[in-house]
Structure formats: C-alpha cells, structure tokens
Image: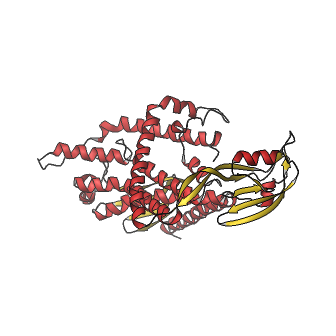
Amino acid sequence: MTESSGVQTNSQVRATLGLLAVVGLLVLLGSLSRPMLAVTLVIVFVVFAHELGHFITARMTGMKATEFFIGFGPRLFSFRRGETEFGVKPILLGAYVKLVGMTNLDEVDAEDEARTYRQQSYPKRLLVAVAGSSMHFLMALVGLLTLFCFMGEPVVEEGSWEVASVLEQESGGERSAAARAGIQPGDRILFVEGQSTAAWGDLVEIVRSRPNDTVQLEVLRGETNLSIATTLGADGDGYGLLGIRGQKATNLVKYGPLGAVRKTGTEFVTMFGQSVRGIWTIIANLGEVADRIFSPPNDPSANDNLETRPVSLVGAVQIGASERLSGSERMQLFVAFNIFIGVFNLLPLLPLDGGHIAIATYERIREGTTGRRHIIDTTRLLPITYAVVAFLAFFGLGAIYLDIANPLGF
C-alpha cells in the first residue's frame, strides 16, 4: 500500500466514524426526548440556512468559497464538490462558510485575487453580508404566513381556562388522577360531578373538598365532549388532588390569504422592534445580566426578570421541547428566534455580519467618486474584535450555565 492510499483510507475511516458519531449522538438525544431532538434539528437547519444564504450569494457574485461546514471543532465528515469542501463538525452550535480574501490580512493565491470578497463591488459585498440575516427574516415571514393561514394564531379567551399541563405522578409516586383519566393539555374541564368549573377557582374548591372520591368529569377536547371518571388523590393536608395546572384558554384564529399577508407584515414589524428593544435592554443592564450568569444553582431570583435573562441554544431547546407549548406557540417561538438572530447578526461589530456591512459601507464612503478601491487595514480593528469575541464567549457560556443551573421551567 502506498503512502497516499493509506492516507486516503485513514481519511475515509475517519469520515465514516465521524458520521456514525453524529448520527449516534442524535439517536441518543432522540431516545431521551423526541421533542428535544426535533427542536435541535430545527436549530441546526436554521444555522445551516443562514450560511446557505452567504454561500448562494457568494457563488452568484463570483466569489470563491472553499469550505461550508455545520458545527465547529475537528472535522468529523466532509466531501468535496468542485472547489468547496462540505462537512460536519461535532459542536453543533453554528456553521460557517469560508470565503477567500475576506480582509486584507488573508493570504490568497494571485489567480484567486479577483474572486476574493475584498475585491468585489460594494453592492456584491453588501449582498453577501446581509444574506445570512435575510434568510432568518425569510424563514420568519414564511413561519408567520403558515401560522396565520393554516395553524391559527393563539388568542387568549378572557374568562375561560384550560389544562396547561398534567402531573404524571403525585408525591407518593402514584399516578395522578388526571394522568389516570387521560386528561391532556388543552382540555377544558367544564363540570365535576355536575358542578360548573367555568372558573379555575371553582375547580380548585370542588376538588379540594373531595379527597379520594371517584368523580365524573365533563371535558371538552377540541370539539368533542367527553365524560371521564377518575378517583381523586389527596395531599399531605387531606385536600383532594386532580394533578393539573391551569392557564387562560386560547382560541386558534385563522385568516384568509390577504388577511394573513397583512397580519404577517404587521406582526413581523412588531417582533422586529421587540428584538431591537430586547438587545438594547440587555446592553443597558449588563450588570444585572452578569449577576444572573453568576447566580448559584436553583436560585429563585435568577429568572425574576425575563427581559434581562439571557437564553442560550440549550435554553431554546428546553423551551421548544416543552409539552406546555402547542404547535402554534412553537411556531411563534421559531419566528421570534429567527427574527432575534437576524437582528443580532446585524450589529455593526466584527465578527458579526453587521461588522462586515459596516466595513464595506465605510470603504465605499472613503472611495467617494475617485473610483479607486479602498480596503481598510483590519489589524486596527483586531483589539475590538477580540473583545467582542471574548464577550460573546462569556455571554454564551454564561447563558448555557444559567439554562442548566436555573432552567426557565417551560
């Protein structure tokens, strides 16, 4: 066997093992929680779509892309198509496309200089830089249209309540009365033993007064009325227990095509503004954010003010996989996530996309009407860039710790 063939064989073995490792980790996550696997795959798709926007626009404008990877860290699996290597790396917290000659610091072969990012016109560089956030905004718009046309917007129905979640087991280890009865989130319990439970307090009062009694529940599930018998439990003080949490009832409101388009536009603008205000709130309250990041595990005050409570991808998976969320609410979360990431990436700081937009715009202003290409010396921006990277690393790791030590509890 020649040395080159041995290297090729080792590369193929590594690629196979890497692919099996990624698939194995996803299978393990799916065995633990299918909803978490689904949310994780959605997030991977979102970051893939972001980089796909950069890749497609770079190819459209004649730039050379040498790598397109999902994840960070050592290469697990890759293949080459044309001049680009596509692959997967183990830390699935992002993705990247490597374009040649992004700054004046990048060394590029002479024959590739004309295809570098730095040598392209301002409109081309701007198109590539904004493509990532544009993909997020496009996914958000499609998600809103789907929500309003087909799934229905959750609208709170004042004066009514529904089951938010079902307690599977009581403190003694026995299945709760609601779990035995097959009560589901979204059900509306209308009567208990013929007594109206139109208000949540009515249900609480009736159930507390009947520990260990067998009762008949009249339940509305969707448009179907059900009559269910179950035996209530009892707590340590002798009060009856059903084993549910209640919340305000919601109706799913759908719109016609034109109404859905109008609603999508107004809702997108509203959520865009909320994302801008949310980012500014975090920046303006960095001290409080730091206090939360350094909070000890199980700190009851860590989640008091959600406006200054950072959420990592771990937290996003936890929230998205919660059984308390309906399909429509998950779609709203998907839309909000995309809009926030799209807005955040437009901040005028390297290494974010907004930093490249700011540099391209500054270079175009410096060129004026001279027609001479101006390329900024990126070394002057390195201290700021390193500071931003360090802050994002601290913020991201701190948010992951916070989501593990003090989860939001969705």
* Residue lying at 43% horizontally and 51% vertically, measured from the top left: 339
**In the picture provided, is 118 more to the left or to the right than 285?**
left
Left or right for 272, reference 396: left
Up-down relation of residue 284 to residue 239 (above or below): above
* Residue in view at x 47 percent, y 61 percent: 148
Please say if 88 is above or below 396: below
**What's the colour scheme?**
secondary structure
In percent of width and height, residue 201 lies at 72, 45
Q: Is residue 25 visible?
A: no
| Near-viewer residue (101 or 168) | 168
> Horizontal placement of 232 versus 284: left or right?
right
Residue 164 picture location, percent across and down: 67, 52
Q: Is residue 235 above or below residue 337?
A: above
**Residue 37 visible in rendering:** yes
Return the x and y of residue 124 as percentages of the image width and height: 26, 57
When asked about the image quadrant of residue 382, the answer is top left
Between 307 and 8, which is closer to the camera in this rendering?
307
- Residue 3: x and y in percent read 50, 66
Return the residue found at the far left: 370
Farthest residue to the front: give it: 195
Q: Residue at x 42, y 57 (%)?
A: 263
How many numbered callouts?
Answer: 0
Relative to the observer, which residue lies in front, 122 or 247?
Answer: 247
